[in-house]
Amino acid sequence: MLHRMQRVDRVRRFRSPLSMVAVCLSASGLLIAQSRDQVARDEARVARAVDSVLAGLTLEEKVGQLVQYTGDYATGPQGRTVTSSQREIVRRGMTGSLLNVFGSDNVRELQHVAVEESRAKIPLLFGLDVIHGFRTVFPIPLAEAASWDPALVENSARISAVEAAAAGIHWTFAPMVDIARDARWGRIAEGAGEDPLLGSLMAAAKVRGFQGAGLSNPSSIVACPKHFAGYGAAEGGRDYNTVELSERTLRDVYLPPFKAAVEAGAGTIMASFNEVNGVPSSANRWLLTTVLREEWGFKGLVVSDWNSIGELIPHGVAATEGDAALLSLEAGLDMDMMSGCYRDQLVALVKRGAVRESTVDEAVRRILRIKYLLGLFDDPYRGISREQEHALTLHLDHVAAARDAARRSIVLLKNEGNILPLKPSLSSIAVIGPLADNVRDPLGPWAGNGQAQDVVSALQGLRSAVRSGTDILYAPGCTVSGGDTGGFTQAVALARKADVVLAFMGESSDMSGEAASRSSLGLPGRQSELLAALRQTGKPLVLVLMNGRPLAIPEDVARATAVVEAWFLGVQAGHAIADVLFGSYNPTGRLPATFPRSAGQEPYYYNHKNTGRPPVDTLNYTSRYIDLPSSPVFPFGFGLSYTTYAYSGLAIANPTLGVGDTLHAIVTVANTGGREGGETVQLYVRDDVGSVTRPVKELKAFQKVRLGPGEKTVVQFALPVDALAFTGLDMRRRVEPGTFTLFIGPNSAEGLQSAFSVRAPVESR
Ligand code: NOJ
């Protein structure tokens, strides 16, 4: 403890680069305002510099630039040590980039080999999955999306970049911007959920946060939106599985977050593992070149996913590694992460004339360009030092931001009899469940350099917040997924003694993320039985969920008096949970994905099509399951507060729109409860009739308001008509004329309704 305090004193001497953010952001605003000519002149200058480096490279060295190795992949923990084989690979110019190597000493050592001991002296690019924090671990992206707050997400990404850059990282394989409509898919944890608008806003925010004031700033790391594209639509929610997706749905649902990330300036993109309609992304020229570069104007580098070039062979579109390398390079894939196909095949392919050297050159240029923009040719070390790394790691400001992000990510799902917030008069609280005193799982999947020792467990958070006079009684009761019920007796005995029971249940962190698809969405192991036993005590029962995906737990929800969705909240999980349970923070989170009744309903998402026979639970021959109500347990956008809100007075100022118009709508929102709170006012639109079928509703805008008790406000929306565009029957993107239904309310299932119309087609980009 003393040691931690001493370090805290020391870090105070360092100013976190975050304090520079305001200045830098306005500077980047100026950059955006630069004339097109200036941008073109800058690009030309970079291109000249890159060309002069390229001109000095042998073919082998060029190919080396296209190769990415992982650190320490054959032995020991990734990224912790530098091996002699790594040094040799770098010395021989066999790689342009390393992943999973970090730490200022390690990075300096290998970079020194690259720029002093290799012939070509080209600096390395160091990459890592900094998905939701480096050492200060923030809530998983799905949780942060529940904040519906792009500024918060940008700030977390900024802090993650500051810490990662100080540890020598230049490049994060993030944000993960895959739309996920199927909660069985474990990687739903890594993204912003099911909605294209929310996903796009979060994608752009993360890119801005990671890349900060511009790549040349040493606290910036280059972003890599992934996995391009359609990965979230894996059949059956099974990771790496086949994707069959119409081009229309791909363009209207799955691509918008990528486009938003590219428009926010993302420097790189990662191709996905999956195939889309028969063509694996790593060989998909239409995706990687036609859409990405030609339609969207992307100038950055495209990296493969881990071994995804080699996997073109089991996909069955390449017979040999040579074919795979050829297909990928020609498709527009610049860097080979870990398959070895480029390393082993490209030189020979060029020599025998199967691949043009100019194609290799183009890929090398894109990699050198990123290195140049990062300033690596000026200072290959970007000023990193052990001292600064130490000072910025877990900086107090970063940890405070992690707590704030965590509490804003929590979603209150049920609160019968206003059992929450917990009353100060309680004499004892039973804290039960396998996740209650857990310091590993709150880190969630893909936790960067996150360490269990940094995590505040729920029990620790509650203990540090509870009033003297209230006892906390703790028993785990069972494990997350084990079959042992031996701990039930003690847990139930404690519950009997307490005024209220808090049950911390859910998934372990390795049940979501990559290669962690589930076929069922219930509480694993014996947790539901434990919850039922706790219910039998008759004590008020608060179920606090920790999980990386929507769960299908209608019976557990019914058993609980209150339900709090606490996801995997990162290093400050326990404090954030205590803030919400004791009421020092009034919850504001809203679900970024639908909570179904059963895994059998998946893929289940709010913005589905209507069908010709929309579901009516009491009517046969409608589009429903005979054994389940059609509604979800909790709809997209849902979340409660310790106060209540009422909506009234929805009005549209200009109900007929034409080209260039903006829809102006207002609604009055009142805080009808007893304390101050924050509401997320959501605007959805249904396009009543289209040339092709349209979703039953789509989120088009939202606003967050804060209201004191009894206060009300008029919320004004201005929606450009262009926001109604979609890919029509002729595959052109436009707004079709006709009538639209407008919904404004607290979530995707409730709200006030009105109508407007568009009088003529509006062409769109
Ligand atoms: C495979 C994952 O799909 C990808 O998201 C990640 O960035 C790479 N491995 C590197 O760790």
Image (cartoon, rainbow, N blue to C red):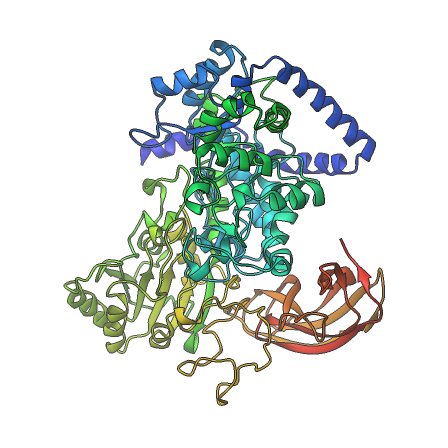
Residue 498 visible to an observer of this rendering = no
The residue at 59%/66% (across/down) is 679
Where does the image place residue 33, in percent across and percent down from the top left? Answer: 79, 38
111 displayed left or right of 726: left
* Ligand 1: quadrant of the figure: top left
Q: Please say if 522 is above or below 230.
A: below
Say which quarter of the image contains residue 207: top right
- Taking the spot 65% from the left edge, 48% from the top edge, the residue there is 259
Residue 411, x across and y down, in percent: 47, 63
Residue sitting nearer the eye, 101 or 409: 101
How many numbered circles does the render carry? Answer: 0
Residue 475 horizontal side relative to residue 346, left or right: left
Q: Nearer the viewer, residue 518 or 425?
A: 518
Q: Is residue 156 left or right of residue 26?
A: left
Q: Position of residue 642 (x, y in %)?
A: 50, 69
Report whether residue 604 is seen: yes
Quarter placement of the N terminus: top left
Viewer-proximal residue among 268 and 22: 268
**Where 38 falls versus 121 (above or below)?**
below
The percent coordinates of residue 184 (x first, y second) are 41, 61
Q: Is residue 491 above or below residue 567?
A: below
The residue positioned 43% from the left and 30% from the top of the image is: 340
Left or right position of 271 against 248: left
